[in-house]
Amino acid sequence: MPKYRPDPSPAKLSQDVLAAIRQAGHAGITSQQLALKLGFKDKGLRYLLFDAIDLLLDEGRIQSGKKGRYTAEGGKDSVEGQIDIIASGAGYVRVEGGAEDIFIHGRNIGTALHGDRVLVKVMGGRGTRAEGKVLEVLTRRRTEFVGTIHKQQGRLILVADDQRVKQPFFIPPHEGLNAQEGDKAIIALGEWKDSRDTPRGRVVRVLGRAGEHHVEMHAILAEFGLPLEFPESVQLASERIGNGVTPEEITKRRDVRAIPTITIDPDDAKDLDDALSVRRLDNGHWEIGVHIADVSHYVTPRSVVDMEAANRATSVYLVDRVVPMLPEKLSNDLCSLNPNTDKLSFSAIFEMDDKASMKAEWFGRTVMRSQRRFAYAEAQAIIDGSEGDFKDEVLTLHRLAQVMRKERVDNGALEIGGNEVKFKLDEKGAPIGVYEKVMGPANWLIEEFMLLANKRVAAWVNKQRKGGVPPFVYRVHDLPDPEKVEQLRALAKSFGHSLTVSKDEDLPHAINRLLHDVRGTEEENIIKQVAIRSMAKAVYSTENIGHYGLAFEHYTHFTSPIRRYPDLLVHRAMAHYLAGGGHLDRDALDVSCKHSSRMEKQAADAERASIRYKQAEYLLARIGQSFEGIISGLTNWGIYVELRENKCEGMIGLRELPGDVFRFDQERYVVVGHRTGRRFRLGDELTVTIKAVDMDRRTVAFALHGERGPVTTSGKFERRASGKKKPGRR
């Protein structure tokens, strides 16, 4: 129960008063009862309480009823939650505690924006679906938005790039910061309490002209709340960090510089944070070292560099660039395991036999030296039979990795990994080609040893049982969604395959068998995509529930501290526990886990947005052309189609399908024509024509080839073949 000093925060007091009134429900609560509930024993201080009540009355957030009782708008029929806006303009409010999401029709959204925490009045619904109305925005998820400046009836407005933000923002003349029509800009949202009014914004930064490559990439970063550059204080602090590989430091570490050591990375990588060493021991076993850059030596807790890294939580990979978690001095120099240079590392060293069976393990700080940097293609060439440096080492690592991979899959690990979409860009950043980056044995080689290190580090911590298992950062992956698994089963059946769990196996084995059965078929990609969608998202947590997808009881992230903050926390925790330290602060680790999981999602969303932008830009020059495609998604508003030739995706709006009225049948996961019964299913092959590209929204509109019908794009402004923008309502 709150106890207030003579000078409580007015905002905090108002929140507590409002919470107490809401808790009272329809019956209401008197000021006397409020005083007792909130701990105002000193009658001389009750003027603070009355001021808070008057403020809430003026704002319309509470009302005064019979016998001096105050009630809050909504009463017991109201709940709080976070609202997610969907493409149609409607929303769903996620309520804590496992309750069903509440559907909010677009007309009942009020002033809520995507991600806001809102108060909702529950108003029944259709069937089992609860519906509601937003009564109040409690807290804004974000107050800055990025988009394109337009002129409408002589006034400046900003149309947000985020498709879930439906309202344009009016910019008063004195708040425009010299922004011009066609500029990309960031605006700060002003006060907006009446949905009948247009929200107002103040331009805080002009990024440049819309459509320019670097401007659009910066806009994507800003849209997802990701940093555009490092603060000057962080850059200066990083420049002052010394090399660290001193004779004194080397004496504190295990010296592995003489052991054959290599790195295998993409040919354009600059942050090399992992290396592998291999040598035959006198007893015939293999000693395999997984050496990871010791970022924790250079980045000390609560330093300005550490606080910036903690805030970023991850590096961000857009189509043309890396936005690093650490300044370049660290990520590309001091902490990068560049060849022929002594480097400080944190290592997991394993002794195993020819069957990759573990015989011994050691964890600790080391000093290492990579003798050869391999690109994946170079290592793959050796695996395929070519001659080259460190051939024996590469082939030994490859052979052991194959054994570990087979054992992992036999234990139930899922083999769902897909290929990445990549772009060939010209000197101005325009896409001139699209291709898939295919994973191969050289990639799997590295993956298996990184998985091994991550697994064994987590298992080691779990064995330290003095006073209970010590708090730690785990990478966890929950069970799949049963409803989505049923969708996968139905999809497989429609292609003549089965997803059946036999008596002696579990679901992961059945999914792997399905993926093996569809390998090389036309439907492989779509079934793999739906299998991925059926899975829960892996997150960071101090609660170890295991990793379902990898079939590991214990798992963490230890191998990429240059680009992931949780890995840096794991290094610090390992150093602490190896030195015999007591339990770390679980609550502090839990806060970092939640923040890192959230930032990981934002980074992934930004990466996908940059891909969508380049796909849209690539197809902008191909409006009117037709392509073969496959249905990759079905929704209440449209059919998503992935083009076979270039992996670009677009949508056919259900309203644009000619000859019938089409509806999405959620249960059967099919789009059906009301009169004709014509059906569209996931994986169906279609020939589509590119009708329009909306660069502001990064969307592409398709039409069925040879079938006429009006096509519009989502978004306030439509980019047509001429490239001009035409204002219009969605």
Image: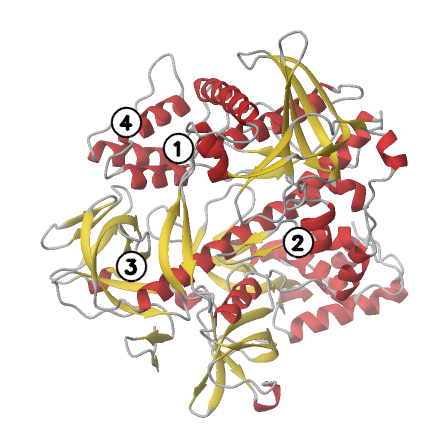
Instruction: Categorize mark 3 by other alpha carbons within 10 Å: few (<14), some (14-19), many (20+).
Output: many
Instruction: Categorize mark 2 by other alpha carbons within 10 Å: few (<14), some (14-19), many (20+).
Output: many
Q: Residue under circle 4?
A: 517
**First of labels 2, 1 by sequence position:** 2
Tag nearer the camera, 3 or 4: 4
Tag nearer the camera, 3 or 1: 3
718 above or below 367?
below
Q: Residue under circle 1?
A: 482
- Tag shown at residue 312: 2
In the rendered structure, the answer to whether residue 307 lies left or right of residue 157 reads right
* Mark 3 to mark 4 CA distance (whole Å): 29 Å
Q: Residue under circle 3?
A: 651
**First of labels 3, 1 by sequence position:** 1
* Mark 3 to mark 1 CA distance (whole Å): 27 Å
* Mark 4 to mark 1 CA distance (whole Å): 22 Å
Q: Is disc 3 in contact with disc 4, using a CB cutoff of under 8 Å?
A: no
Q: Nearer the viewer, residue 263 or 436?
A: 263
**First of labels 2, 4 by sequence position:** 2
Amino acid bearing label 4: Asp
